[in-house]
Image (cartoon, rainbow, N blue to C red):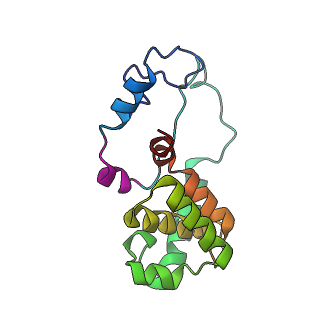
Amino acid sequence: MNPCPCGYHGSDANRCRCTPDQVRRYRDKISGPLLDRIDMHVPVRSLRQGELQNKTQGDNSSVIRARVEQARARQIARQGKANHQLSAPELEHHCVLTEGDKALLEQAINKLGLSTRAYHRVLKLARTLADMAARDNVNTVDISEALSYRTLDRQSSNQ
């Protein structure tokens, strides 16, 4: 979705003409239950002129695909299914957290007002991030990164 009705909120290239109230009303059009079902809320900036033709420094698609396939294979070997298919009890079994990580997640849930569904989505994403890094256990970095992708929750809790 666009960040606001005019589409330029937060843009470096164009000036947003929307009032804070217009931005809030626009974002409020997405219901909480629908927002809960979206695992990652990632802001994407507009490309500047000429950026499409520039060579990127990142990995190409085949390298990324191989990493994703390896992570999925880890999931299947560990639990017989992909992380997104885990039930809540299965998730607790395959995503054991330290007391510090539990506290971090609890604090984020309270601050962002996350639902139980969003909590489980964050855990599944953290489990996937650990798999992408070929780690057996979820750690604070994985949880923090998973929470960082909940930008729309953060914006809603600040209003």
In front of the other: 84 or 5: 5
Whether residue 111 sits left or right of residue 54 in the image: it is left
Percent of width and height locating residue 158: 51, 41
Image: 147 above or below 15: below
In front of the other: 32 or 113: 113
Image: 99 above or below 152: below
Q: Residue at x 31, y 42 (%)?
A: 30
Observer able to see residue 45? yes
Q: Quadrant of residue 84?
A: bottom left
Image: 94 above or below 107: below
Percent of width and height locating residue 59: 64, 48
Instruction: Read off the magenta span.
Output: 30-38
Q: Residue at x 65, y 35 (%)?
A: 56
Image: 130 above or below 46: below
Q: Residue at x 42, y 61 (%)?
A: 118
Percent of width and height locating residue 12: 60, 20
